[in-house]
Amino acid sequence: MSRNTVGTAAPSTRKAPPRPGYGRLLRTPGAWTFLLPGFAARQPFAMLTIGIVLLVQHTTGSYGSAGAVAAVTGVSMALFAPQSGKLADRFGQRAVLVPGVLAHTASATALIVLALADAPLWALFVAAVPTGASVPQIGPMVRSRWAALLGGTSERESLLPTAAAFESVTDEFTFVIGPVLATALCTGVHPAGGLIAEAALTLVGGLLFAARRRTQPPTGLRGAAATGEPRASALSVPGVRVLAVAFLGIGSVFGGMQVSLTAFAEEMGAPGVNGLLYGIFAAGNMLAGVVCGAVAWKIGPRRRLLLGYTGLTLVASTLWAVHSAPLLAALGLLAGLCIAPALITGYTVVESLVPASARTEAFTWLTGAVALGQAAAVTVAGQLADAQGASAGFLVPLVGTVLALTTLVALRSRLAPKGSGRVAARGMGHRVPTAVD
């Protein structure tokens, strides 16, 4: 009898945990102090490549040259971003951001002046290197702030997957606004308008974000000493390298779409359509990201990553054969719907693979991989568009996603966290599915 009494009484004394969701996440004390300036500071990431392509194409008349300059910027960012992340982990975000945004503003200004002065291509390459190297890694820094802010209790940690989805939605929202804004400024105001706005937003947003010191995560010097975790490069983890290859493929989609859609709009005789088409593509990313954060997933993150990437590859395989703007917009929307799950899941998985002292660096390796894939795609797609037309440029996303998907399938076992999952318990990793409002 007592056993039955206990069995019926227990549920009435057990309090259900709060449901994680976007509303509860955004009510986290201190969140808005870094979210608003962070949004302004990360906007330029979506404007930089398209701003360079439109400016240099205007001054040189060549998509190949424009793509090459943008590619140098992307490669430089991909190589320097992880080092920036490592320095931020060790010395603090403010120490890296303040000199970084000043250097980026000066470098972007020099690139604009040289392009408008019809400087030789090598001079544009020289200016593109520091422009890319100094791009502030706001997205990874915001993710690190969420992880630090929500760590400590199981109730707060239940919000970390929602934070991962929210950040991906924010990233994609910038790719809805950024290319459209840059294209409108370049085509409607001045060819350098997009790049000027990019530099201004980087300066103002970056300095405001750096000023929010209270939510800055502890530096690696303190964090590693407190947890006993060794400081090692995040790239030494095999799973991070696999994810970097996957993000290279995603970058090939971004870069290939940017150049090929620009060339497609030029062939149509309506350059302004480019921003609309790319905005639809980015809107698909954003919508899928919202859904990803609102679904209680019953399948694991590795399987979600493979499914999303397979869908992306299938859509990318059809772009080159399309010659209709409405149909291209529809396929772009589908591609965006497939990209967001892959991005969100990739950031979720990497958090379970690396120690907390290498968190920002790990995020920047993935961000840098996207930039590197985008740079390579911009270069190749630009050359193909010059020689064969816009349709040939769309072959770049196909090749990039096929190679990345092959790598993911072959090396998927390396994405499983080893040991007891000590980091996943604190990071933005995958957990038992929970309902999201």
Image (cartoon, rainbow, N blue to C red):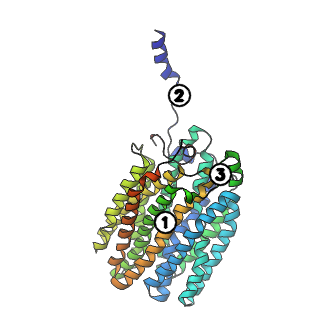
Mark 3, mark 1: which one is toward the viewer? 3
Say what amino acid the circle numbered 2 marks: Lys
Tags 2 and 1 in contact by the CB under 8 Å rule? no
Q: Residues within 10 Å of mark 1 (few under 14, many from 20)?
A: many
Secondary structure of the residue carrying numbered label 2: loop
Query: Residue 319 shows which numbered tag?
Result: none
Is the residue under label 1 in contact with that under label 3 (CB below 8 Å)? no
Please state the horizontal and vertical placement of residue 303, each as a whole percent of the image.
39, 50
Three-letter amino acid code of the residue under disc 1: Val
Label 3 Cα crowd, 10 Å radius (few <14 / some 14-19 / many 20+): few
First of labels 2, 1 by sequence position: 2
Observer-nearest of 378 and 215: 378
Q: Name which of mark 3 and mark 1 comes first in the sequence.
A: 3
Badge 2 crowding class, 10 Å Cα cut-off, few under 14, some 14 to 19, many 20 or more, is few
Q: How many marks?
A: 3
Quadrant of the image containing the N terminus: top left
Q: Kindly identify the residue that appears in the image at 53 percent across and 51 percent down.
A: 353
Percent x, y of residue 103: 66, 74
Specify whether residue 196 is in view: yes
- Tell me residue 284's x, y (percent): 39, 60
- The image's mark for residue 370 is 1
What element does badge 1 sit on? helix
> Percent x, y for residue 78?
55, 69
Left/right placement of residue 33 relative to residue 330 reads: right
Q: Secondary structure at mark 3?
A: loop
Instruction: Report how far apart the C-alphas of labels 2 and 1 lie in the structure.
Output: 43 Å
Q: Residue 230 got which mark?
A: 3
**Residue marked by disc 2:** 15
Q: Nearer the viewer, mark 2 or mark 1?
A: 1
Quadrant of residue 425 within the rendered picture? top right
Choose mark 3 or mark 2, whichever is in front: 3
Give residue 296's quadrant in the image.
top left
